[in-house]
Amino acid sequence: MSKAEENADKVKRNPADKLKRKDYEKRLAGLHVQLVKLQEWVKFKGLKVCVVFEGRDGAGKGGAIKAITERVSPRVFRVVALPAPTEREKSQMYSQRYVPFLPAAGEVVIFDRSWYNRAGVERVMGFCTEQQAKHFLETVPLFEKMMVESGIILLKYWLEVSAEEQTRRLKDRINDGRKTWKLTPMDLKSYSRWFDYSRARDEMFKATDTPWAPWFVAESDDKRRARLNIITHLLSQVPYSKAPRQKAALPKRQKRGKYREPDYPFKYIPEVE
């Protein structure tokens, strides 16, 4: 039994020690400035960056991705979250579905779940055969080596959440009307298979944690701390500097001339009391 399995029923961090919102927002603001600098450098140098997020349901992947992308351009930082494959896609070579979404020069592509679906949910829930899963684990290191050799900077993050925290978050999705959209029938089906997922994760790490594409694990019971840790690590893995940029200055506005505001009944939305 792995260390992660032995500790599955333990709370990794005292809830009272979780990072306070004010501290989190202050530190996140500084990291957002650095992410914008990274963005401009990626465009300037034509870098290709691919970031993969994996983890159990409720591990905090979506929140981490939102924290990364909320202050940068969606034309540079593209998020890919593919739906279930179509019948045509099921007939394709497995990796073929993901290749069109890989980054070109000047792009950062973030996968909210990726080709590793085959090593996780597909394997555990029986959507692929055991032979297909093992073949994937044998071949994906070569696929990723081709990515890296083509000039892609590949970062793979696994968000590790405790059993108790996952339960709390999934219950919150059931009871909070703002979060019900996050809860899928698949979440409920997979919830009971904690150790099946643990074994699948362990085998995935063993087969695909390579020198050219290692896995980085972030403990995510404290969502805020995990987001800061991930962003800080991401910034450390992509060498960047300040891209040259002409200092901006607002020009003078043109004079009104003969322009007059139209006498038109604009339909203003009502103000909330």
Image (cartoon, rainbow, N blue to C red):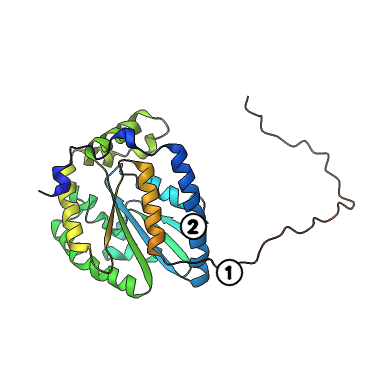
Residue at 38%, 48% (x, y): give it: 227
Is residue 53 placed above or below 137 in the rendered structure? above
Disc number for residue 244: 1
Location of residue 225 in the rendering, given as x and y in whole percent from the top left corner: 37, 44
Instruction: Tell me the CA gap for discs 1 and 2.
Output: 15 Å
Q: Secondary structure at mark 1?
A: loop
Residue on which disc 2 sits = 34
Q: Which amino acid is tagged 2?
A: Gln
Whether the residues at callouts 1 and 2 have beta carbons within 8 Å, the answer is: no
Dot 2 falls on a residue whose secondary structure is: helix
Residue 28 position within the rendered picture, expressed as x and y whole percent measured from the top left: 46, 47
Q: Quadrant of the C terminus?
A: top right
Residue at the spot 52% in from the left edge and 58% down from the top edge = 36
**With 173 as the anchor, is 240 left or right in this view?**
right
The residue at 20%/52% (across/down) is 201
**Lateral position of residue 2 relative to residue 225, left or right:** left
- List x then y, in percent, for residue 21: 44, 37
Q: Is residue 222 visible to the viewer in this orientation of the structure?
A: yes
Question: Is residue 237 rendered to the left or right of residue 13?
Answer: right
- In the image, residue 46 sits, relative to residue 64, either above or below, namely below
- Quarter residue 232 falls in: bottom left
Q: Position of residue 104 (x, y in %)?
A: 44, 69
Question: Which label sits on residue 264?
Answer: none
**Residue drawn 15% across and 45% down?**
5
Q: Give amino acid for label 1.
A: Pro
